Amino acid sequence: MKRTFCRTIVIFILSVAVLWLITALSLFLGFGRSDGIPPYEPTYSRDYADVFSRREVTFFSGKNRLCGWVYGEDETKDRALIVIVHGIDAGADTFLPLIREFVSNDYTVLAYDGTGTRTSEGSGIRGLSQAAADLHAALSFVKEEASLSDLPLIVYGHSAGGYAAAAETADHPEIDGVVCVCAFDRPLSEMMAKAEEYAGFGAYVGYPCLALQYHVLFGTDGNRAASEALSDSKVPALIIAASEDEAVPGSVSLYAMRDRIEDPGAAFELVNEPYRDRHATVHLTKEAAGERILMAEGLEAPDQTICNEVDDGFLKLLFDFMEKQIDM
C-alpha cells in the first residue's frame, strides 16, 4: 500500500511538472516577438510619409520602452484623441488606412507598437493580456501630455486590442467611449477555444497550469472579463464582430456576451458581408477584403491601393458612435 501510494504521488508530481513545462513552452513559443509585416500591410515610410506627419513618442510598459506616434495634432481642429490598440501579429502601421480617415476628420490619433512588437522593446508578447497592460501604460502617458489629456478620449482596439479597450474601462474613468472590433471576452477562454481546435478535450488537461502561469504573469486581473468591465464602468462601447471570424470563435467573443453587458451605452454590430466577415477584413471594402484573401492564398500579388480601402459603412458606424460620445 505504501509503495503504491508513493508511486502514485511521484507519478502525479512528474505529470504536473511535465504539464507545467509544456504550458510554459507553449506560452513562450506562441507569444514570442512579432516583427513580421505582411506584404499587403501599408507602412508609414513606404506609403504614407507624404500623406501626413507624425510625432514619435515613447513610454514604458513595465520595463520595456514602447514606441508610438501621434498623428494629426492641430490645436484649432482637434475633436478628440483616438488611442489605437493593435492585436497579436499587428502593429501601429497596420491601422494607417484608418488613421488617415481619422486625421482627415480632425481627430488626433495615438498608435503604438505593443510589447515585443516591431519597434518596441520586449523579448516577446507574453500573452493576450499584455495588450491591456500596454494600454494602461499608454493612457498613463496620455494623462501626462498636456496637449493630449485635455481632449475627449476614445479607445479603438482590434482583437486582443479590442479586449484591452473594454477591460481597461474599469480602471480609466477618463475614457469617453471604446470601439471593440473582433474582441474576445476573456483571454483564457480565447486561448482554450483555440487549443481545443488542435487538441480536442485534451487541451483542458493543462488548464490549471495555464491559469496559474497566467496569474503569475499578469496578476489577479489577467483574465478579467471585458463584459464585466463594461458593465461596471458603464463606458459607452461599440462592439463589432465578424460572422466568420476564424481567430476569435463566436462562443468566446465579446459580442456573444451582449446579453450580459449591463451598459446602456453599448451598441452591437455583426458584419456578415462576404469577404468582410473575417477577423482581419471587417473594416475593409468587399473588394479590398477579397484581394487580401487571394493574397493570403498566394493567388494574387499585393496591390497597396486596392487592399487597404476602408469601407464607408464601417467608417460611418465609427464616426456616428464617436461623435455621439464627444457631444455628450
Image: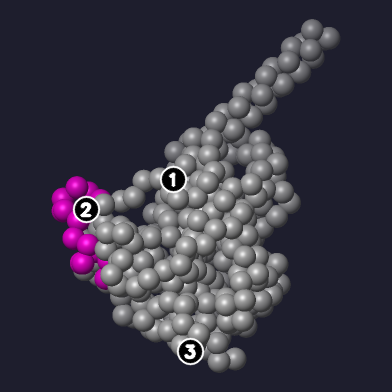
Q: Image point 67% across, 19% down: which residue?
A: 14
Q: Nearer the viewer, mark 1 or mark 2?
A: 1
Q: Amino acid at mark 2?
A: Met
Label 2 secondary element: helix
Alpha-carbon distance for marks 1 and 2? Answer: 20 Å
Residues rendered magenta in the picture: 293-309
The residue closer to the viewer here, 256 or 171, is: 171
Assign the C terminus to one quadrant of the image: bottom right
Amino acid, disc 1? Ser
* Residue to which mark 2 is pinned: 295
Mark 3 or mark 2: which is in front?
3
Residue 269 picture location, percent across and down:
45, 75
Residue 261 picture location, percent across and down = 62, 72
Q: CA distance from mark 3 to mark 2?
A: 42 Å
Describe residue 50's horizontal placement relative to residue 209 as left or right: left
| Image location of residue 66, percent across then percent down | 54, 54
Q: Name the image quarter holding residue 290.
A: bottom left
Query: Gap between marks 3 and 1, in whole Å?
Result: 37 Å
Question: Which callout, 1 or 2, points at the residue further toward the start of the chain?
Answer: 1
Q: Nearer the viewer, residue 7 or 84?
A: 84
Say which residue appears at 66% left-offset and 24% top-offset. Answer: 17
Residue underneath mark 1:
34
Which residue is tagged 3? 76
